Image (tube, rainbow, N blue to C red):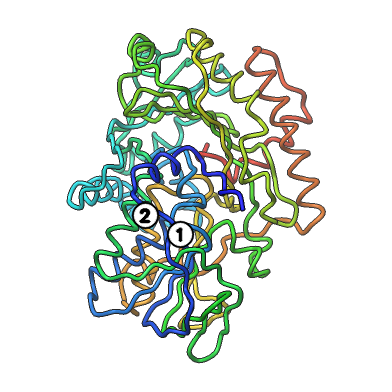
């Protein structure tokens, strides 16, 4: 059997491990908590449970290796939920919106501190984030939400002079920029593998190559796997983009959409000449955002969301292959950085992002079962918020009465998409309209009226609130 294709970050992390095959579950066992899914959400939940209750028997079952899903293949941008403030306030009220924004900013420092304390070399660089306008149509699109954050005393953002924006972002294509120091970038494969190591050191048992085949939702839940089962007092479903396949009640709660990435071979001298000798995450303000950042070993990674959509949220093979949109990614890379045109690419890859109507994750109890908890829907921004997911799910498991268990985030899905086939047809109609609109705006042309109208339908699940 051929070895599975590993995305760049995970392959790089696994290369530093002596053996990373994992051990499957081959017996019937019992546990206090069984976590299904060995990515960021599952691992943070396990770690935070053991930190609070070292006596708990915590088991993780993972269909592949920890980090083989979205956690090991995202762009590695460590961001907050600050730009979702308007959506948070509309859904939850001003007080809860402020609390969630502040918690998401706290999570950035918590992740960095955890890595430092536990010797996880995840290449964390807290060099901030720069949200830009890469054409005139994007100018001031972020100003309403950032002005409101400032008015509410929640803002870590400042507008930079254009010369500083272009120098720091390494490209004259940027026409405006807002900077926050409460962000950065990291190597996600090394982070997720490091979390798995620490979890096991704390006493968590991790079973790899152990997919959940069925979940018996009795008074004491049972997770059935190919060669064993876990009878657990509490179950946590941390499957994210894989949830709709196994639990049809979430089929309209999310849309699976690809985020496609490429990364160059090391070119540290060229990056230094461009001014990219830092780990700042740079994102523009279009609906299908362009995002990029450098790596500790002198590479440049660029990604773009909103390319491929899954019919009926089925996890098709395209989500586990080199990006079929590599040509589009190279076009964007060379548009931002013409001087890197001759730098060879090291890899491209694709990941499935579980987009929600609101652009926010949601949590709850499966079918109202008091012993089965879930969380998903990070909408392309899971590196930082998944730490909060661990806080939420560990609080639910422990039955705590705190701000997280009282939060509206734990009340389940925050909206529904249209049923199939309307959703599939609709998202492609909207995607193509957005692409036409963005091409027109990049060329300083007025987009067609119909394209503008269709593009507005995607704003709810976009990168940031526009007001």
The secondary structure type at the circle numbered 1 is helix
Disc 2 packing (10 Å; few <14; some 14–19; many ≥20): many
Q: Compare residues 410 and 331 and report the one nearer the observer.
A: 331
x 39%, y 67%: residue: 206
Q: Quadrant of residue 404?
A: bottom left
Q: Given the current orientation, which residue lies at the most extreme front position?
A: 1
Q: Position of residue 203 (x, y in %)?
A: 27, 71
Q: Which residue position holds label 2?
A: 100
Mark 1 Cα shell of 10 Å, populated few (<14), some (14-19), many (≥20): some
In primary-sequence order, the first of circles 1 and 2 is 1
Label 1 sits on residue = 92
Q: Residue at x 70, y 56 (%)?
A: 314
Residue 391, x across and y down, in percent:
34, 63
Position of residue 337 measured from the top left corner of the image (x, y, whole percent): 49, 13
Which secondary structure lies at badge 2? helix
When the figure is inspected, residue 121 is found, relative to residue 177, above or below; the finding is: below
Q: Nearer the viewer, residue 107 or 237?
A: 237
């Amino acid at each position: 059997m051929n070895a599975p294709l590993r995305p760049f970050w995970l392959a790089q992390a696994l290369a530093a491990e002596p053996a990373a095959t994992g051990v499957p579950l081959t017996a019937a066992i019992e546990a206090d908590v069984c976590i299904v899914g060995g990515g960021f959400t599952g691992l943070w939940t396990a770690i935070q449970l053991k930190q609070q209750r070292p006596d708990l028997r915590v088991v993780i079952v993972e269909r592949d290796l920890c980090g083989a899903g979205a956690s090991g293949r995202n762009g590695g941008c460590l961001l907050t939920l600050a730009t979702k403030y308007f959506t948070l306030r509309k859904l939850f009220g001003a007080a809860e919106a402020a609390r969630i924004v502040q918690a998401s900013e706290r999570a950035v420092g918590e992740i960095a501190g955890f890595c430092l304390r536990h010797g996880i070399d995840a290449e964390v660089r807290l060099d901030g984030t720069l949200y830009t306008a890469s054409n005139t149509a994007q100018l001031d699109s972020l100003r309403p939400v950032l002005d409101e954050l400032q008015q509410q005393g929640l803002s870590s953002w400042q507008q930079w002079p254009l010369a500083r924006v272009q120098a720091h972002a390494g490209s004259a294509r940027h026409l405006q920029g807002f900077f926050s120091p409460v962000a950065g970038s990291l190597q996600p494969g090394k982070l997720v593998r490091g979390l798995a190591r620490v979890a096991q050191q704390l006493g968590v048992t991790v079973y790899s190559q152990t997919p959940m085949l069925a979940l018996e939702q009795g008074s004491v839940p049972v997770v059935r796997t190919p060669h064993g089962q876990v009878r657990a007092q509490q179950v946590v479903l941390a499957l994210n983009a894989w949830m709709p396949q196994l639990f049809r009640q979430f089929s309209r709660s999310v849309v699976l959409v690809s985020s496609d990435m490429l990364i160059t071979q090391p070119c540290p001298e060229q990056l230094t000449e461009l001014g990219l000798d830092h780990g700042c995450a740079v994102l523009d303000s279009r609906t299908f955002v362009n995002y990029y950042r450098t790596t500790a070993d002198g590479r440049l990674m660029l990604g773009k969301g909103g390319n491929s959509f899954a019919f009926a949220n089925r996890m098709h093979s395209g989500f586990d292959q080199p990006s079929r949109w590599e040509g589009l990614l190279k076009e964007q890379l060379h548009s931002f950085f013409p001087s890197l045109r001759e730098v060879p690419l090291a890899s491209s890859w694709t990941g499935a992002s579980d987009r929600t109507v609101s652009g926010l994750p949601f949590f709850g109890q499966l079918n109202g079962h008091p012993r089965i908890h879930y969380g998903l829907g990070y909408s392309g921004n899971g590196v930082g918020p998944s730490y909060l997911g661990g806080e939420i799910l560990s609080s639910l498991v422990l039955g705590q009465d705190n701000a997280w268990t009282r939060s509206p985030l734990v009340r389940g899905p925050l909206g529904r998409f249209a049923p199939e086939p309307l959703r599939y047809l609709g998202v492609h109609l909207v995607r193509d309209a957005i692409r036409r609109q963005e091409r027109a705006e990049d060329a300083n042309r007025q987009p067609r009226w119909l394209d503008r109208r269709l593009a507005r339908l995607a704003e709810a699940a976009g990168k940031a609130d526009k007001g």
